[in-house]
């Protein structure tokens, strides 16, 4: 059974690549993910690892056998198949060959920037900047820890993963800082308290937009709503009762007399 990268998730690719390094138990894969700091890029729980391993086994990408290490009960040890290795190599080649896709995620939000008001744009991009800066600090700290703890040279794929991610985040932070500064220069009032922006249609709706008037709907009184519902149910029941009576009267009038009554 073959499978293309189009339907293989990041977690599946990661776990399959770890099994490709050599036969491993499920808990060893868990430790490797933690030791390499892969959770900075990958969201996966311990139970999900076994779910993915079983899925890969059903797809003939890995095989398993029960093995005991002498200290714990027997566990499944997983090995990659030739077919699984071929699919893995093709998937990784496609990922490295293709430039990052545009028009999705953050870029899609930028393409539709005009949907938001200037103050909203400033707020969400400022929050993005804060979150990205925190993420960069976490990844950089993890990278420094790896370099300090490992007595042997850092594996090439670990080095590539960390340095590339850090470079991308630094570049995006630099762009965000420049764009936010330009945005504040264009809409200076976006940094003012909300109470001072009520009469500023440019900040609220954009430079080329007219002030939008909103008509608030008053929230009905709950007690009155319940009373109306009760009256509605009462009216419905009275209507049904009247209808039943009318139907009975009509049925009595329309029912033909029996031959015995004529006699």
Image: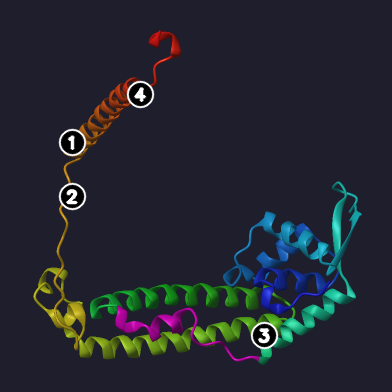
- Which disc, if any, is residue 12? none
Residue located beneath label 1 in the image? 223
- Nearest the eye: 28 or 71: 28
In 3D space, how far apart are the residues under numbered discs 2 and 3 (Cα atoms)?
53 Å
Q: Give how far across and how far down residue 75 sits, in percent.
A: 85, 52
Kindly check if marks 1 and 3 are in contact, taking CB atoms under 8 A apart as contact: no
Against 18, residue 176 (above or below) is below
Q: Is residue 254 above or below residue 179?
A: above
Q: Evaluate if marks 4 and 2 touch, with contact meaning CB atoms under 8 Å apart.
A: no
Label 4 vs 2, first from the N-terminus = 2
Disc on res. 219: 2
Q: How many numbered discs, if any? A: 4
Q: Nearer the viewer, residue 209 or 119?
A: 209
**Start and end of the magenta stretch?**
98-115
Counting residues from the start of the chain, the first of labels 3 and 4 encountered is 3
Circles 3 and 4 in contact, beta carbons < 8 Å: no
Report, in whole angstroms, how far the alpha carbon at label 1 lies from the one at label 3.
60 Å
The Cα–Cα distance between marks 1 and 2, rounded to whole angstroms, is 12 Å
Q: Can residue 153 be seen from the camera position used here? A: no
């Amino acid at each position: 059974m073959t499978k293309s990268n189009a339907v293989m998730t990041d977690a599946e690719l990661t776990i399959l690549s770890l099994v490709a390094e050599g036969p491993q138990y499920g808990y060893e894969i868990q430790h490797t993910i933690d030791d390499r700091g892969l959770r900075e890029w990958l969201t996966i729980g311990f139970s999900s690892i076994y779910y993915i391993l079983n899925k890969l086994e059903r797809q003939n990408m890995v095989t398993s056998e029960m093995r005991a290490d002498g200290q714990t009960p027997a566990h499944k040890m997983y090995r990659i198949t030739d077919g699984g290795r071929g699919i893995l190599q093709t998937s990784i080649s496609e990922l490295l060959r293709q430039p990052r896709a545009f028009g999705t995620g953050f870029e899609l939000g930028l393409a539709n920037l005009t949907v938001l008001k200037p103050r909203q744009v400033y707020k969400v991009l400022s929050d993005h900047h804060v979150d990205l800066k925190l993420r960069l600090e976490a990844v950089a700290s993890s990278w420094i820890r790896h370099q300090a703890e490992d007595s042997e040279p850092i594996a090439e794929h670990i080095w590539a993963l960390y340095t590339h991610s850090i470079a991308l985040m630094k570049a995006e932070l630099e762009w965000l800082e420049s764009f936010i500064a330009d945005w504040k220069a264009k809409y200076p009032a976006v940094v003012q308290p909300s109470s001072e922006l009520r009469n500023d249609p440019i900040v609220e709706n954009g430079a080329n937009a007219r002030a939008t008037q909103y008509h608030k709907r008053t929230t009905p009184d709950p007690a009155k709503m319940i009373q109306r519902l009760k009256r509605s149910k009462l009216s419905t029941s009275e209507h049904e009762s009247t209808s039943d009576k009318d139907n009975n009267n009509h049925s009595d009038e329309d029912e033909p007399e029996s031959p015995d009554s004529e006699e």
